[in-house]
């Protein structure tokens, strides 16, 4: 190989080697970028909160009850206190709130959306027309005896209904007869516009025909006959159990585990035993469990996305690594050839200078 040819070959090999080294540098930079992306994904994964299922203990609380006679009191709150009663000198260490079932006599309204009221006028001789609600025959209160036990029950019920439902037509009729409840007549005649019947639950329901109170056209039998699609309200009175909330200072004793064992309420010398039970809020627990299932699905979806992106990065990295190995092989081959060309050039130089050597 001549000197010129060898030099041209050397320059060509040098350029190719430079290109190979440049491409290798580009590949290394690309792999570094992929490594950074992979690191970011793993950091994101590590920072994610792994959902944990709720525990029933988180939604359970200790419930205290105590009995006073036949009534059970449920404690809803106990707060620490330091109060000394100036009358009895007792120092109360707590302020408790509790609920109790209280039975109250109440007037109650019934709503019959399809009353099917009718006035039966075709009656045997000597009998009076009467009202029907469906298949039930109504009784006019003026036909009752004021000396009967039922009369006292009826007037007591009507008094309570008028108190609890003052805007009803029944209340207006009752108040017009009794001077606003001040005096109940001793005869039945004034009650000719009030009717009653007993329903399937043994409640005595009261209503009026609508002829007694001026301008009162609703909640009456005659109004329902004229307007069969309108609802009819009737009223009865009965004992109703209601929750009553009370708060008092108390002396509360505790056992070694911190649970209340007894209570003494202010203004009382009686000490009542506390009954302890655990109450779980099932609705709140189920809501928390549903939230956990949702959070778990979201977490698993994020993990799957990160794994998919990581797998894609690893595939790209393996491709770049294979190409880098190919470039390394090519660079070694170029270096070997360059070494050979370098020897040729060295021999050419040596032979050329020896020609002029005397």
Image: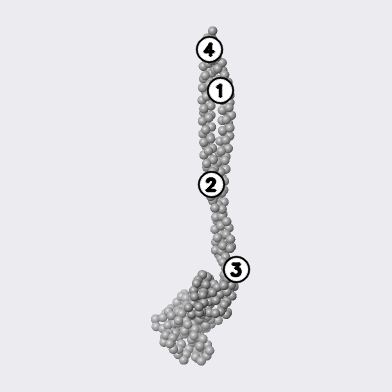
Q: Tag 1's secondary structure?
A: helix
* Numbered disc total: 4
Q: Earlier in the sequence, mark 1 or mark 3?
A: 3
Question: In the rendered view of the protein, which quadrant contains the C terminus?
Answer: top right
Quarter of the image holding residue 325? top right
Q: Which residue is mark 2?
A: 43
306 or 192: nearer the viewer: 306
Q: Compute the Cα span from label 2 to label 1.
A: 47 Å
Residue 175 percent coordinates (x, y): 43, 85
Mark nearer the viewer, 1 or 4: 4
What x and y, as percent, mark residue 70? 58, 79
Q: Residue furthest left?
A: 215
Q: Residue at x 57, y 19 (%)?
A: 343
Give SS at disc 3: loop
Nearest the camera: 132 or 120?
Answer: 132
CA–CA distance in space, label 1 to label 3: 91 Å
Mark closer to the chain start, 2 or 4: 2
Please report the residue visible at 47 percent of the width from the left and 90 percent of the height from the top. 188
Asked whether residue 213 is in view, the answer is: yes
Q: Mark 3 or mark 4, which has the lower sequence index?
A: 3
Please name the residue that numbered disc 4 is placed on: 353
Q: Which mark is residue 338?
A: 1
Q: Is residue 354 left or right of residue 217?
A: right
Can I make out residue 114 in this image? no
């Amino acid at each position: 190989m001549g000197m010129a040819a060898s030099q041209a070959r050397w320059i060509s090999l040098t350029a190719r080697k430079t290109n190979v080294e440049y491409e290798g540098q580009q590949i290394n930079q690309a792999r570094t970028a992929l490594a950074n992306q992979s690191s970011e994904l793993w950091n994101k994964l590590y920072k994610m909160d792994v959902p944990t299922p709720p525990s029933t203990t988180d939604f359970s609380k200790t419930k205290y009850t105590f009995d006073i006679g036949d009534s059970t009191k449920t404690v809803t709150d106990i707060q620490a206190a330091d109060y000394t009663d100036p009358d009895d000198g007792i120092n109360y260490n707590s302020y408790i709130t509790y609920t109790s079932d209280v039975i109250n006599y109440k007037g109650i309204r019934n709503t019959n959306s399809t009353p099917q009221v009718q006035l039966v006028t075709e009656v045997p001789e000597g009998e009076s027309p009467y009202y029907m609600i469906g298949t039930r025959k109504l009784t006019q209160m003026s036909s009752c005896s004021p000396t009967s036990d039922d009369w006292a029950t009826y007037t007591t019920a009507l008094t309570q209904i008028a108190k609890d439902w003052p805007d009803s037509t029944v209340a207006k009729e009752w108040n017009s007869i009794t001077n606003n409840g001040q005096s109940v007549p001793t005869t039945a005649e004034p009650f000719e516009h009030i009717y009653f019947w007993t329903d399937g639950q043994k409640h005595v329901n009261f209503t009026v025909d609508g002829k007694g109170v001026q301008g009162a056209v609703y909640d009456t039998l005659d109004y329902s006959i004229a307007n069969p699609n309108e609802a009819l309200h009737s009223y009865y009175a009965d004992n109703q159990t209601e929750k009553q909330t009370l708060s008092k200072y108390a002396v509360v004793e505790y056992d070694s585990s911190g649970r209340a064992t007894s209570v003494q309420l202010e203004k009382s010398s009686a000490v009542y035993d506390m009954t302890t039970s655990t109450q779980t809020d099932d609705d709140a627990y189920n809501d928390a469990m549903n939230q956990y299932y949702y959070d778990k699905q979201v977490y698993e979806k994020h993990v799957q996305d990160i794994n998919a992106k990581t797998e894609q990065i690893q595939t790209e990295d393996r491709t770049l690594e294979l190409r880098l190995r190919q470039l390394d092989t090519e660079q070694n081959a170029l270096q070997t050839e360059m070494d050979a060309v370098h020897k040729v050039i060295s021999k050419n130089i040596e032979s050329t200078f020896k020609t002029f050597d005397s």
